[in-house]
Amino acid sequence: MGDTISFPHLDYAALWPMLILFGAACVGVLVEAFVPKAWRNTVQLVLSLLAMGAALVMVIKRAAAGVTAANAHTASDAISIDKAGLFLQGALLVLGIVSLLLIGERTLETGGPFVAQAAITVGSEADRRQAARESGATEVYPLALFALAGMLLFVTANDLLVMFVALEVFSLPLYLLCALARRKRLLSQEAAVKYFLLGAFASAFFLFGVAMVYGFANAVDFNSIHANISTSDKPFALLLIGLAMLAIGLLFKVAAVPFHVWTPDVYQGAPTPVTAFMAACTKAAAFGGLARVLYVGFDRSNWNFTPVLGVIAVLTMLVGAVLAVTQTDLKRLLAYSSVANAGYLLVGVLGGGAAGLSSMLFYLVAYGFAIIAAFALLTLVRDADGEATHLSRWAGLGRRSPFFASVFTFLLLAFAGLPLTSGFTAKFAVFGAAIGGGQTWLVLFGVLSSIILAFPYLRVIVMMWLSEPGDTTPSVSIPGALTSAALMVGVLVTLLLGVAPSSLLDLANNAASFVR
Amino acid sequence: MDGYLGPYATVGLLLLVGVLIIGGAFTANRLLRPSRPNAADGKFDTYECGLDPVEGGWAQVHIRYYIYAYLYVLFAVEAVFLFPWAVVYLAGGAKVIAEMAVFVAVLALGLLYAWRKQALRWL
């Protein structure tokens, strides 16, 4: 063999955040194997927080050093850590740290929110013993680290194959995390199986889409796809089929209608800290990936996908909002609200251009913090059977614990998009971008669905404050330091982004560009 | 049969031929065979080389095989990656060897974990 092989140049300064997270996850597996049980939780929590913190420092250092078109691509252009990618990585890390605080909480119930041995049969004698005494599995930390590292790779993948690998890297740990709830284990396992099966279908669609696009463009990297869209002599149908299949894979992850059916079941069944992690981080990662595919790879077929995705955005907003009205479980209600929010984010993405991108980035951060805080509060309202998430149980909570009820009211108002909360600023930015991009019809449906969506939120508020507390109204637990921290950060950011959003808006505006 | 999607016509043709052969065989069977619809003893049993059929087709495999199947897949995939590497590592030098060492080390980490969690012990 006389060929010389050229190896891709790796820009380690740009790759550090991912390398740190993957490395720390591997060390976490070692900790699992060798550190005594009594110490594991502390060691794992500190290790994970340090790793995420270090990765965040690396992201900030790179942002400070300046990202240009010249140094954005690395690893043979398979990874593009440009400004938008860096912003998404930073946002994912910050949201990841806050949700890790929830995952690390161990004071609310014996052993924390996770099951000790997931393999033990539900309802058996051994299961009762472990539920009463044993501390929860600490594998959740390495799993969360792997998932987060996969997300960082996903939002910077500049190549459909790397993107697929990253999709699997962040999905597989999430499937496992969903199955690890300490209470209501059957529900949790059911959620995990549903998520896994549907997720596998979505991944298969994505992969088949990659094949179709390769058939059209003879390449899988976004630059060549972009270049070949106008020059390829292959039938255009191949591109359309490929793009549609890619979109199905991605829209499944962002939970857009009609690919949203897993969302309520999985959000309800998964342990609440994991639900918070998924609602904030998975959504951010999936939208980051979707935006890169649409803006960098396929922007020349803009005319083809905008109407279709517009219809999907409208359906997502309306179906999410209408079904949220009918829910009687708070976790399901928040799940449908997250479906509707995916619709608003899609509206921003379809707005197009820098304005669309920056509004999406801002929305992801604002929504992430609010939803983590909301789920943090959900972990506090509990009775002897664990979290009391049924709506009727929350009646009269305002009389019992006015402070937490006020905080939850504030968060719900933020979801409803009232002024002085981050929800208002974020929706304003998204709708503004859509009008600027000539998609006024989407904004009309967006405003309509916002009005519908306000109803379930207001109903919860009315129940909390205007109903008499019954005998079954649960008490609100005193949060441990970690949950308090996560809750406080979430609420403060939600308030700050409503009152003084300019610094993050500027950041998002500066970051709103992909490098091709 | 030309054009980019043309070769797929062959696949479609093959599919059609397959359907015709199977359908034809069944139709020929139906036409040629005598029809005696009385259920004699054992007439509708599955043919198993003269042995009496065993009850039920639902055999359960013990869950503990799963972990071995899982580990096997892991190392089969590793081997698949090692083959192309084995062809080029002399050309690449130390860097290539180090990269493969990292890859194998990550897999070894998984094996180490399985061992420490006593997943490898046959109970």
Image (tube, coloured by chain):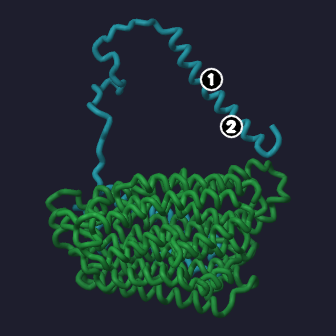
Residue at the disc numbered 1: B20
Q: Where's residue A260, x and y in %?
A: 50, 54
The answer to which quarter of the image holds residue A161 is bottom right
Q: Quadrant of the C terminus of chain B?
A: bottom left
SS type, badge 1: helix
The answer to which quarter of the image holds residue B50 is top left
Which of the two residues, A52 or A96, is positioned nearer the viewer here?
Answer: A96
> Residue A337 vs residue A28: left or right?
right
Mark 1: which amino acid? Leu
Same subunit, labels 2 and 1: the answer reads yes
Chain of the residue under label 2: B
Q: Name the residue rendered at 39%, 83% in the picture.
A: A488
Q: Name the residue rendered at 48%, 64% in the picture.
A: A171
Does A393 appear above or below A377?
above
Q: Residue furthest front?
A: A466
Q: Name the residue rendered at 38%, 8% in the picture.
A: B37
Mark 2: which amino acid? Val
Q: Can residue A199 be seen in this view?
A: yes
Q: Colour of chain A?
A: green
Mark sitting earlier along the chain (2/1): 2
Q: Where's residue A234, x and y in %?
A: 81, 51
Does B3 appear above or below A186?
above
Q: In which quarter of the image is the N terminus of chain B?
A: top right
CB under 8 Å between discs 2 and 1: no
Q: Where's residue A94, x and y in %?
A: 49, 82
Q: The cyan chain is which one?
A: B
Which of the two residues, A415 or A163, is positioned nearer the viewer here?
Answer: A415
Which of the two residues, A151 or A210, is positioned nearer the viewer here?
Answer: A151
Q: Where's residue A335, x and y in %?
A: 44, 61
The crowding category of the residue bearing disc 2, from other C-alpha atoms within 10 Å (few below 14, some 14 to 19, many at least 20), is few
Residue at the disc numbered 2: B11
The crowding category of the residue bearing disc 1, from other C-alpha atoms within 10 Å (few below 14, some 14 to 19, many at least 20), is few
